[in-house]
Image (cartoon, rainbow, N blue to C red):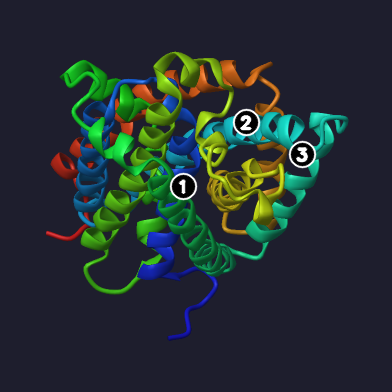
Amino acid sequence: MIFDNSRISARQMQALLILWIFSTALIALPSLSGGLYAMLAGGVIIVAECGLISFAVKRMGMLMRKISAVLAGVSMIFYTGMNIRLLCSAVVLYLLPDTPSRITAAVFVIAAVYAAFLGIQTIGRAGEIIFVIAAVNAVIAAVLCLFDEGREIVGAVGQGQCCVSNGLQSAFLFGGGQALFVLLPRTDGEKIGSKAVSAAVIAVLAAALFAWIALVKFGAADTAARAFPALNIMDTVSLEFIFGDKQDVFMLRLWILAVFSAVGLGIFAFGNIFGENGAYSAVGGAMAFAMSFVPKTAEEALWLIYMAGAICLVLFGALLPLIGILFRKAGGEK
């Protein structure tokens, strides 16, 4: 099926949502060290948020949709900046220790701005391709890690804290469902709400799996001491004959692909606040670049993601959907 450049397919929407949530959660989630049950409880909260947003969006009037999209764009550019900050820190740590972060950020943002400039369909198609590549890498990494330490990982399922507060804290560290306020009004197809929810389920399960593998492999103390524990889970896999001494690059490649898709979507969402013209993507790119230097360290970026997650869960997961449903205007579905 051929879509005009202002529309995407349901499958593209799903790919973009999965990459959006996964890109943040893969790095942020292990920092809490709350245990598997807490992470899954947080995932349930995020899935419920996506379900409520999907239910609300199609019932909102045009004005409420616009307000929600504007607020979502502001939120998404913040997450975009934090992801760029984390990306720059990882690149310096694993790949290019002598390259200034500003250079890495600028190159990454320019590429993402170009994708956003070409429109939402280009972002959707790119996300679809990136998702396939990232999914293959994720499956390989998961299988290798489970094969390497499968008994320990499975046997530790019952460990960790299991309470409402830790589940709520875990929910703050996922990327959140605010992207649906931007994606759903541009998505063609049937049952897009249920497809969005299924995509959220895939994203949270994948992120929780890798975070749990990191916690079991390294322990809570070592995980907390590492800058990017989820990127280190290939450390103990004995495949030097394939990866050499750069086994971390395998997970880093997976994450960079997800981040690129998320950054392009975030830049588009923010630029769309000012109008449909793709040239406004340059404004989003400039804002993302600036936001990436608000935190001085990766740890500070993670703390800001946690704080933003709490605000976004209340705003996008409760207030906006409920207001949109209760005070819907003409233009929304019954």
CA distance separating discs 1 and 3: 23 Å
Residue indicated by mark 2: 86
CA distance separating discs 1 and 2: 15 Å
| Closest to the observer, 206 or 179 | 206
Estimate how packed mark 3 is, as few (under 14), some (14 to 19) or many (20 or more) residues with alpha carbons within 10 Å.
some
| Closest to the observer, 142 or 49 | 142
Among the two numbered marks 3 and 2 on one chain, the one whose residue lies closer to the N terminus: 2
Discs 3/2, front: 3
Residue shown at 64% from the left, 18% from the top:
295
311 relative position to 94: left or right: left
317 relative position to 239: left or right: left
The amino acid on which the numbered mark 2 sits, given as a three-letter code, is Leu
Label 3's element? Answer: loop
From the viewer's perspective, is residue 33 above or below residue 79? above
Residue indicated by mark 1: 20
Label 2's element? Answer: helix
From the viewer's perspective, is residue 6 above or below residue 255? below
The amino acid on which the numbered mark 3 sits, given as a three-letter code, is Leu
- For residue 95, which numbered disc appears in the image? 3
